[in-house]
């Protein structure tokens, strides 16, 4: 695949997961990619859409996962609507990243047009291609990067498939207008077999207008995001490759900050802070810098909030190349996050998605591959059809470290099972029921809720699976932890399952003899609710040795 970053193996897993969801990455190319062979063996793997939430700090959080297509209740968009450019900019619309308000008389058309790209195309078509955007950079960013003339030049590679005219061109204009021209070698548009009329001759004519070289490469068949990016990469002339989604807007200083990272350490992959362009209003919304990208038990990409230790680490790391993926805090690019995918999948969404996930698991997860397949039936069903021999050979050739090493060293806060961790069900002796993790997300990017008991389920159901670490954290998928208050309040001390924080209120110890689960900081014991309704949730109470405070930790094999 991308030979440069792959050489640095500790980066590989985040690179793979990131490449599928992250909209913009910048890498230094070390090797000219001309082996057709390599390109054929790279498979498409993409979470095709994102969801946004406001988390408990009032911060917008974006989460990538597949939602599916909404039911059509509105008249379908006509052939004309789909194939015509209806771009009709109104000066000041969307100015400074402001939301666009659609007039009531246009609401039906708006809804029809929305179906085409799954964002508000009518709003986009009213916004000038050079609209202004707010500058959300910290103050110290503004004076930095003055020596950009010494930075390497980049090829900007933009893959599109049936992209709307206005979003595609606004992406290109914003990238060019807000960058020093001397840093852009060229812009390469890669057309992954689009079907729209306006993306052919009209686009070819239009690109002559740009003040830098803009070229179009076309794939005859649908190859998917990654193969299309590689197509652009193998044709690029720049020293650095910048990959950009086709529905972004770059803000001032975006490129210099990214290239500065690469210049300092050519083995780093740089990524901007990705702000949100609202899919309904096209408002430019600031997102939060202090999140880390990771993946859950289903290998779905997730942003998790930084805990106490990471927050300190991040402060130290600011501007200091760590040799992996680095978020450049002075680079901000807006991206339209959609609630559902507008793309078709020629082989079907399930086959495409789960073949790709199964490949990642087979190639990279070692002992944890079976753990992934255990809880992901669709991937399990396709895994035997896959041939990943050459990928495993590549991994061996590059002497990549193991997934276990990755979990220990790169991602110590992970919530995956391990040799020295308990993994399995937590059963209450009195009720003969099991602890279950919440699945509802209430205005946050991670599910959370009171800790409750349910009828115990089988080994193949991950809802009742928990990890208990040597440090005493009882964790579950999506970085959730068993959490209890440290100080008495009004009423019972209610136990919750919520985002892992690393704080002592989430530390427990298990006494094998008494079967008690003790809250470390206040020595109270995990107790059933006392109410008949299991939804009432567990509490911590003074330890009394009764069965309502006895728990069995039932190992479940995961390898
Ligand atoms: C829209 O198109 C789909 C598929 O082409 C069709 O099933 C559906 O009935 C159409 N809806 C309307 C409201 O025309
Ligand atoms: C955008 O372009 C138009 C026409 O060229 C110009 O009048 C306007 O000032 C520009 N707006 C910004 C924000 O640069
Ligand atoms: C994908 O798999 C899920 C779960 O088995 C199923 O409900 C869904 O209908 C499938 N979707 C497609 C498009 O095949
Ligand atoms: C898998 O691919 C390798 C080359 O990448 C090939 O040598 C091998 O025969 C293939 N195995 C099967 C079962 O097709
Ligand atoms: C602990 O659980 C038992 C059994 O459900 C209940 O009777 C008792 O009231 C609980 N303890 C407290 C302090 O609520
Ligand atoms: Mn995108």
Image (tube, grey):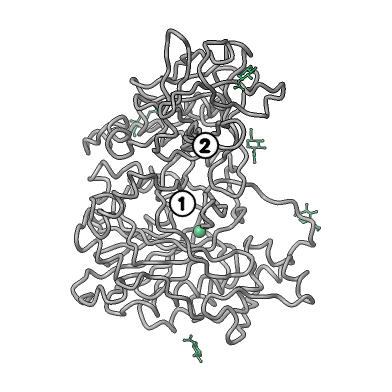
Q: Residues within 10 Å of mark 1 (few under 14, many from 20)?
A: many
Query: Mark 2 CB in 8 Å range of ligand 3?
Result: no
x then y, percent, for residue 402: 28, 31
| Residue tagged 1 | 21
- Tell me where residue 5 appears, x and y as whole percent: 27, 49
Where is 86 relative to 419, above or below? below
Residue at horizontal 46 percent and vertical 53 percent from the top: 225
Residue positioned most to the top: 513
Residue occupying the point 74% across, 67% down? 78
Q: Is residue 333 visible?
A: yes
Q: Nearer the viewer, mark 1 or mark 2?
A: 1
Q: Are marks 1 and 2 in contact (CB under 8 Å)?
A: no
The quadrant holding residue 360 is top left
Relative to 420, is 496 on the left or the right?
right
Front residue of this view, candidates 463 and 243: 463
Residue under the point 32% across and 36% down? 412
Mark number, residue 311: none
User: Which element type, helix, strand or loop, lies under badge 1?
Assistant: helix
Say which of 228 and 558 sits in front. Answer: 558
Choose between 379 and 143: the one closer to the eye.
Answer: 143
Q: Which residue is mark 2?
A: 354
Density class for disc 2 (Cα within 10 Å; few <14, some 14-19, many ≥20) is: many
Specify the quarter for ligand 3: top right
């Amino acid at each position: 695949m991308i030979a440069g970053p792959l050489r640095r193996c500790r980066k590989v897993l985040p690179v793979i997961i990131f490449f599928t969801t992250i909209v913009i990455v910048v890498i230094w190319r070390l090797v000219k990619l001309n082996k057709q062979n390599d390109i054929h063996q790279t498979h498409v793997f993409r979470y095709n859409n994102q969801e946004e939430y406001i988390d408990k700090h009032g911060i917008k959080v974006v989460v990538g996962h597949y939602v599916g297509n909404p039911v059509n209740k509105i008249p379908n968009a006509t052939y004309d609507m789909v194939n015509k450019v209806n771009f009709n900019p109104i000066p000041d619309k969307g100015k400074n990243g402001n939301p666009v308000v659609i007039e009531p008389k246009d609401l039906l058309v708006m809804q029809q047009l929305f179906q085409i790209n799954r964002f508000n195309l009518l709003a986009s078509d009213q916004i000038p291609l050079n609209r202004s955007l707010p500058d959300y950079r910290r103050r110290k960013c503004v004076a930095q990067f003055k020596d950009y003339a010494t930075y390497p030049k980049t090829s900007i590679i933009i893959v599109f498939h049936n992209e709307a005219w206005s979003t595609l061109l606004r992406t290109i204009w914003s990238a060019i207008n807000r960058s020093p021209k001397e840093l852009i070698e060229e812009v390469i548009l890669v057309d992954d077999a689009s079907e729209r009329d306006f993306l052919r001759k009209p686009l070819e004519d239009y690109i002559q207008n740009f003040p830098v070289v803009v070229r179009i490469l076309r794939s005859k068949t649908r190859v998917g995001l990654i193969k299309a990016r590689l197509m652009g990469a193998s044709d690029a002339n720049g020293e650095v490759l910048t990959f950009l989604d086709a529905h972004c807007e770059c803000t001032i200083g975006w490129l210099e900050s990214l290239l500065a990272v690469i210049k300092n350490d050519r083995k780093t992959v740089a990524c901007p802070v990705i702000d949100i362009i609202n899919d309904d209003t096209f408002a430019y919304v600031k997102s939060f810098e202090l999140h880390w990208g990771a993946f859950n038990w289903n290998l779905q990409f997730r942003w998790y909030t930084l805990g106490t230790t990471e927050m300190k680490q991040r402060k130290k790391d600011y501007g200091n190349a760590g040799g992996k993926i680095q978020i450049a805090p002075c680079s901000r690019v807006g991206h339209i996050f959609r609630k559902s995918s507008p793309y078709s999948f020629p082989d079907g969404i399930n086959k495409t998605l789960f073949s790709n996930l199964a490949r990642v698991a087979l190639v990279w997860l070692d002992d944890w591959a079976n753990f992934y397949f255990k809880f992901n039936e669709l991937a399990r069903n396709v895994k035997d059809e896959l041939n990943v021999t050459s990928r495993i050979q590549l991994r061996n050739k590059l002497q990549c470290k193991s997934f276990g090493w990755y979990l220990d060293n790169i991602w110590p806060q992970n919530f995956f099972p391990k040799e020295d961790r308990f993994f399995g069900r937590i059963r209450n002796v009195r009720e003969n029921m099991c602890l279950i993790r919440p699945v509802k997300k209430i205005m946050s990017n991670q599910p959370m809720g009171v800790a409750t008991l349910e009828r115990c389920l089988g080994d193949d159901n991950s809802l009742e699976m928990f990890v208990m670490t040597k440090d005493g954290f009882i964790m579950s998928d999506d970085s959730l932890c068993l959490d209890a208050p440290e100080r008495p309040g009004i009423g019972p001390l209610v136990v919750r399952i919520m985002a892992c924080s690393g704080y002592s209120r989430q530390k427990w110890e298990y006494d094998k003899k008494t079967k008690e689960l003790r809250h470390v900081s206040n020595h109270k014991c995990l107790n059933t609710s006392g109410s008949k309704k299991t939804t009432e949730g567990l509490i911590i109470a003074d330890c009394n040795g009764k069965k309502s405070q006895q728990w069995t930790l039932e190992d479940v094999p995961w390898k």
